[in-house]
């Protein structure tokens, strides 16, 4: 093949064009490659950092959970200088982005509630990430209790509805529907109180909540006369 034929070869011309583009944009291409490498390295580094943080938080949770199970809510919340342990507060402050840190928020809320600090308990629950499935029902119901104790009955009713429908089953769903109905009643929303009490009778006729639902419907009927 002659020199002239080589110069006219499409593959050679494509390579030359690529080389030309590279030469014109060399700095940008190199900079982009370096940035990509840094992003990948940063992602790997963050993964191992997160794993390390999670392990540390899990280790610190043990003593706090022990105090919690002993109903020593103050030590569970703030730690014990005598035992050289940290509490849920410190775990949240230092490891709040971990799964253990998230669970510590729920524990801290229960501790605050038992210590008589309902608003502080609600503050923790509002930042708590509720788990999917049946494990999320209890925390949502507890949040409904907090709203009720603070006199926020409409918000309590909506939270109980969320708990009822978070994981629908024959046990927790009618229970939370009844709590929602009672909360609506306390909020003066008699229409929705009747709706969810009747829903229990229609869809969960074998549940333990049926007598209370019937009683509420009777109260609403008498009040309407």
Image (cartoon, helix red, strand yellow):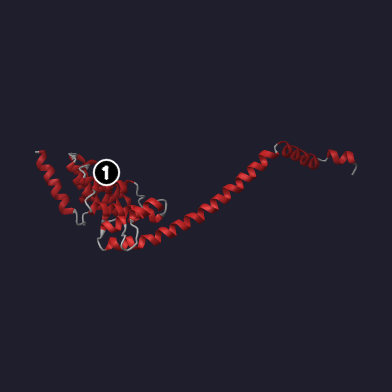
Residue extending furthest top?
24
Residue 32 position, x and y percent, is 63, 42
The answer to whether any part of residue 98 appears in the image is yes
Residue extending furthest right?
2
Residue 145 position, x and y percent, is 23, 49
Would you place residue 221 above or below residue 96 in this image? above
Q: In the image, what residue occupies the spot 25% across and 48% down?
A: 144
Specify the quadrant of the image occupied by residue 33.
top right
Nearest the viewer among 193 and 94 is 94
- Can you identify the residue that label 1 sits on? 158
Residue 186 position, x and y percent, is 17, 42
| Mark 1 nearby-residue class (10 Å; few <14, some 14–19, many ≥20) | some
Q: In the image, what residue occupies the spot 32% across and 46% down?
A: 126
Q: In the image, what residue occupies the spot 70% across and 39% down?
A: 26
The answer to whether any part of residue 132 appears in the image is no
Q: In the image, what residue occupies the spot 35% across and 63% down?
A: 62
Instruction: Tell me the quarter of the image containing the N terminus.
Output: top right
- Secondary structure at badge 1 equals helix
Residue 3 position, x and y percent, is 89, 41
Instruction: Tell me the quarter of the image containing the C terminus.
Output: top left
Position of 138 with respect to 31 (left or right) is left
User: What is the count of numbered marks?
Assistant: 1
Would you place residue 32 above or below residue 111 in this image? above
Position of 119 with respect to 51 (left or right) is left
Would you place residue 200 above or below residue 67 in this image? above
């Amino acid at each position: 093949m002659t020199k002239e034929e080589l110069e006219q070869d499409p593959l050679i011309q494509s390579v030359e064009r690529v080389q030309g583009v590279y030469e014109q944009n060399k700095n940008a291409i190199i900079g982009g490659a370096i940035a990509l490498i840094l992003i990948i390295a940063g992602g790997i580094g963050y993964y191992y950092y997160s794993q390390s943080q999670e392990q540390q938080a899990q280790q610190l949770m043990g003593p706090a959970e022990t105090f919690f199970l002993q109903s020593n809510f103050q030590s569970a919340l703030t730690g014990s200088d005598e035992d050289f342990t940290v509490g849920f507060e410190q775990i949240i402050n230092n490891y709040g982005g971990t799964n253990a840190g998230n669970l510590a928020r729920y524990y801290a809320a229960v501790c605050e509630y038992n210590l008589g600090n309902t608003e502080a308990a609600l503050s923790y629950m509002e930042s708590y990430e509720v788990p999917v499935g049946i494990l999320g029902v209890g925390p949502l119901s507890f949040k409904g209790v907090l709203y009720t104790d603070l006199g926020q009955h409409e918000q309590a009713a909506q939270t109980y509805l969320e708990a009822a429908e978070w994981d629908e089953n024959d046990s927790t769903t009618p229970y939370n529907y009844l709590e929602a109905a009672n909360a609506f009643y306390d909020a003066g929303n008699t229409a929705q109180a009747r709706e969810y009490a009747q829903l229990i009778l229609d869809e969960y006729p074998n549940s333990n909540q049926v007598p209370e639902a019937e009683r509420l419907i009777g109260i609403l009927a008498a009040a309407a006369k």
